[in-house]
Amino acid sequence: MFERPDAGERAVLVQLDLNQGALSERLSELELLTASAGASVEAVVGGRRAKPDSALFAGSGKVHEIADTLRAHDADLVIFNHALSPAQQRNLERALQCRVIDRTALILDIFAQRARSHEGKLQVELAQLDHLSTRLVRGWTHLERQKGGIGLRGPGETQLETDRRLLGDRVKMLKSRLARIEKQRRVRRRGRDRREVLSVSLVGYTNAGKSTLFNAMTKAGAYAADQLFATLDTTSRRLYVGEAGNVVLSDTVGFIRDLPHALVAAFHATLEETANADLLLHVVDAASEDREAQIDAVNRVLGDIGAGDVPQIMVMNKIDLTHAPAAVRRDECGKIVRVFLSARTGEGLDLLREALAESARLAASARQAPDDSPADVRDINHHLQ
């Protein structure tokens, strides 16, 4: 409908107060997402509503304000930090005469840019088609007409029906390919289980420093950058932790508040690696003022993917910015619950290795405990959970 210019797009951001809280953090996050997608932020339009307008989300008066802001800054794109319905998106594009995207479409666009592996590209395309399918059903009314013209007359099928059928065929093919990849992943995981190697997954809010920590621990050279969703593809490496032997450490996609359900569904195979881990290292940006809300957002996604009960160690990263000392915190039962470190400077990495070695020893003891020693097994399982 609207052409994307070759140069970076100029965007107007819209963030409305719908009583969801943490407005400044949400806006800051939207600005980072916009920059990650390759657009420049020209202006921000705010406002307060009790609930979204059914037709325009923001209401007619606010849409006029957005239109004036667009013209004043010569912008060509409007980004809403909210989820828009197909009808709302269509109505806004008609009223503003420019492309309008919501938070979901923005995150999908970033994922499309970041995907590197074959699996990652398939997962992103599936998520995009899932998002597009709702726009086909109710958004593209201009396609609800019969094809016509020489060479264009079909067997009585409208353009919308054709698009919907082709989209459905593509979705079916993508799901089939991803199912095969997921099967291969399960075979590899069973082989790992037979070797009785502790499986550890790095999880956390996007840009918390997971990939930097992964590289510092494993020397893997995985892509790490100060941007949202720098990592999409799961990378696994063996990590030697002294007398306890090896563990398998996996770097995974970062989470974010209001992560689109289409992405969670499409990345099921990748996220399943997290749900099947023996231990999660929950990496937190200790320097962020919004860290508690970010921790809650990650835990909500972990619950959604079936990883809510996997044991966690909280890794408080970036202590070089908070000037806190490297340290290990234990609970009243002696279980390690937090490790304070800096992945960038390396301070505290030895403490994390010791924590992993302790977890690996406990897991090995649990596997070797005799069947007639339930008390010992319960005690070991308590330390791991």
Image: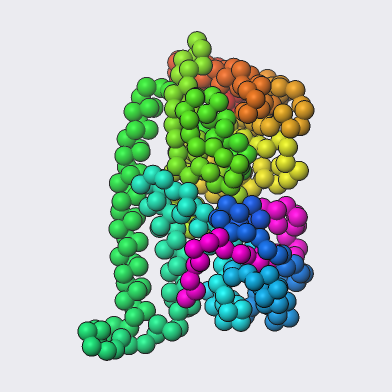
Which range of residues does the magenta coloring cover?
1-29
Image quadrant occupied by the C terminus: top right
Describe residue 158's horizontal placement relative to residue 334 as left or right. Answer: left
Q: Residue furthest top?
A: 243
Is residue 213 visible in the rendered image? The answer is yes
Q: Nearer the viewer, residue 376 or 173?
A: 173
Which residue is at 40% across, 82% downward?
143
Left or right of residue 382, residue 325 in this image:
right
Return the residue nearer the eye: 185 or 27: 27
> Left or right of 40: which side holds 327?
right
Give the quarter of the image for residue 168: bottom left
Residue at point 66%, 60% (across, down): 41
Task: Choose top left, top right, bottom left or bottom right for residue 89.
Answer: bottom right
Residue at the farthest front position: 7
Q: Which residue: 48% across, 30% down?
A: 221
Q: Position of residue 213 (x, y in %)?
A: 57, 30
Please name the residue shown 39% across and 44% down the image: 117
* Residue 179 falls within the magenta-colored stretch: no
Q: Position of residue 274 (x, y in %)?
A: 49, 38
